[in-house]
Image (cartoon, grey):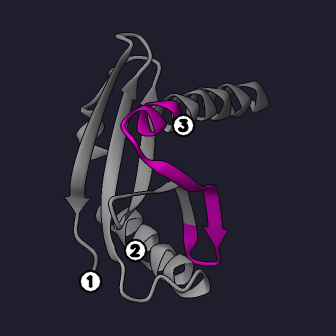
Amino acid sequence: MKHASITTKTIGNEGELLVAVWLINQGFTLLARNFSAAQGEIDIIATKENVVAFIEVKTRQSIHFPLSQVVTPSKQLKIIKTAKIYLMRNQFVDSIYRFDVALVNKEQGSLEYIENAFQGA
């Protein structure tokens, strides 16, 4: 069973790397990857034109259910709380920020990037 989790983690890491490269090519500056706090983890934090983007990356080998439905309200809340910790620790006091989701389908070789996928409180 441990093999499956390693495979899942490897697939996730590959997806995050793909998204990181894509973001750089779009003019973003990466600030952090896999930022962790007690509340949760954020896959990628990047900035472009004075906007800080907190990006959740979802990678699948193939599609068994819509990727757009995998960021649950409880996951969103964890990301929002973790983002607030990051903003305070790094003194982004008056920054504009948003929550984006990147959906990677390895089978199709596709990347769908959703800006403002959900709102922070």
Q: Amino acid at mark 3?
A: Glu
Instruction: Answer whether labels 2 and 1 touch (C-beta < 8 Å).
Output: yes
Q: How many marks?
A: 3
Between discs 1 and 3, the one toward the N terminus:
3
Question: Residue 56 placed where, x, y %?
Answer: 43, 51
Residue 121, disc: 1
**Segment tinted magenta in the rendering:** 21-40
Q: Residue at x 50, y 80 (%)?
A: 87
Q: Residues within 10 Å of mark 1 (few under 14, many from 20)?
A: few
Instruction: For marks 1 and 3, give the CA distance.
Output: 26 Å
Is residue 85 left or right of 75 when viewed as pictured? right
Q: Is residue 88 magenta?
A: no
Q: Residue 11, located in which quarter of the rendered image?
A: top right
Mark 2 packing: few (<14 Cα in 10 Å), some, or many (20+)? many
Residue 80: give its label.
2
Return the x and y of residue 44 as percentages of the image width and height.
Answer: 52, 52
The local crowd at label 3, few if under 14, some if 14 to 19, many if 20 or more residues have their Cα within 10 Å, is many
